[in-house]
Amino acid sequence: MDLVTGSILCVPPLSPLLRDEVGRRYDVLDLPVPDRDAFLAENVEALSEVVGIVCTNAGPVDAALVAALPRLGVIANHGVGYDNIDLDACRERGVVVSNTPDVLDAAVAETALGLLLATRRRLVEADRFVRAGRWADGEFPLTPQLSGSRVGILGLGRIGRTIADLLAAMGCVVSYHSRHEVPGTPYAYARSATELAAGVDNLVVVVPGGPATEALVDRPVLDALGPGGVLVNVARGSVVDQTALVEALEQGRLGAAGLDVLADEPHVPASLRELEQVVLLPHVGSATEETRAAMRRLTLDNLASWLDSGRLLTPVPE
Ligand code: DGY
């Protein structure tokens, strides 16, 4: 028997698998996207029964939504990043928040590696070259190799460490910058993002999103990476100054970029789409069948654990 009873608010977008499973277990309300504020104003009674929220990084949970749910106690976020949630508003109300760490490290690391290979070895351009029937006209240009190159990891958390270890196994020379030096790693520490970028051929962005990292990768960082440099972002679009990135690529001050995340998803500026040396993915860092199943399980387990015992399995760090 649940310690806490009430309904669960599903904040879109949720995968049908997750939404269906929440619906099988609990009374559910679905937040409509376009008419959210009208819905909040018109459904005060139903909203007063909501004790939990299930959401993903693409579904904002802001102060107005928290305020509209007087019995809200828990937010189970399906994702490791939680910059979609107003944590200050939650803290003020004593609402606890969980995320899904660890289970997606391998999938996101694979995505980073894929983007590094795609950009360094120009694999997507090479595919377009073949499809355009240009192979018979001559060889595709030679590219630099990823193995043996220098890679900087911006953010040596769990995912960053997984990427670093994979790259080291490929013979890359790995260094990193994090807010603090991480004890016991075999990788060289750089004291700033700019210092890191200046010493590498490829920079992989894996820091959490949110105000603390907003535009951390700015023009000086991109210029430090330089014309031969590759930027890969599997973190959040907000971490990279997108205008500065487009300018650097257009002006040849940066070599290439592989982006799983953008500033205003799913909006993709035409300037980025037109650049040959950019590989774009629709935020699929964790989107493998195995990982998404594990993320669903952990999201639902967190919710059930809080309802049963008032405890979360994986609360977000304080
Ligand atoms: C996360 O979990 O934060 C990822 O961005 C989802 O792919």
Image: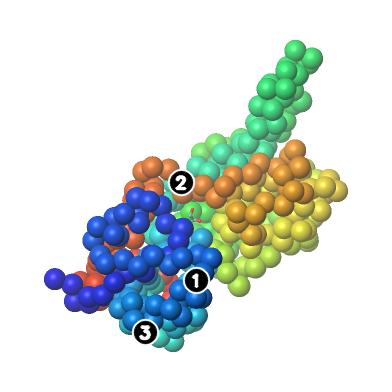
- Label placed on residue 36: 1
Q: Tell me the quadrant of the picture where the C terminus can be found.
A: bottom left
Q: Amino acid at mark 2?
A: Ala
Tell me the residue that label 3 is attached to. 70
Is 285 located above or below residue 216 in the figure? above
Q: Is residue 236 visible?
A: yes
What residue is rendered at 78% in x and 58% in y? 244
Cβ atoms under marks 3 and 1 closer than 8 Å: no
Please count the marks in the image: 3
Dot 3: element: loop
Q: Amino acid at mark 1?
A: Arg
Q: Position of residue 38 (x, y in %)?
A: 50, 75
Cβ atoms under marks 2 and 1 closer than 8 Å: no
Nearer the viewer's eye, disc 3 or disc 1? Answer: 1
Q: Tell me the quadrant of the picture where the N terminus can be found.
A: bottom left
Q: Quadrant of residue 21?
A: bottom left
Q: Is residue 221 visible?
A: no
Q: Is mark 3 within 8 Å of ligand 1?
A: no
Tell me the residue that label 2 is attached to. 287
Nearer the viewer's eye, disc 3 or disc 2? Answer: 3
Cβ atoms under marks 3 and 2 closer than 8 Å: no
Q: Identify the mark nearer the N-term, 3 or 1.
A: 1
Q: How is the image coloured?
A: rainbow
Real-space CA distance between mark 3 and mark 1, rounded to the nearest whole angstrom: 17 Å
Residue farthest to the top? Answer: 136
Query: In the picture provided, is 71 more to the left or to the right than 221?
Result: left
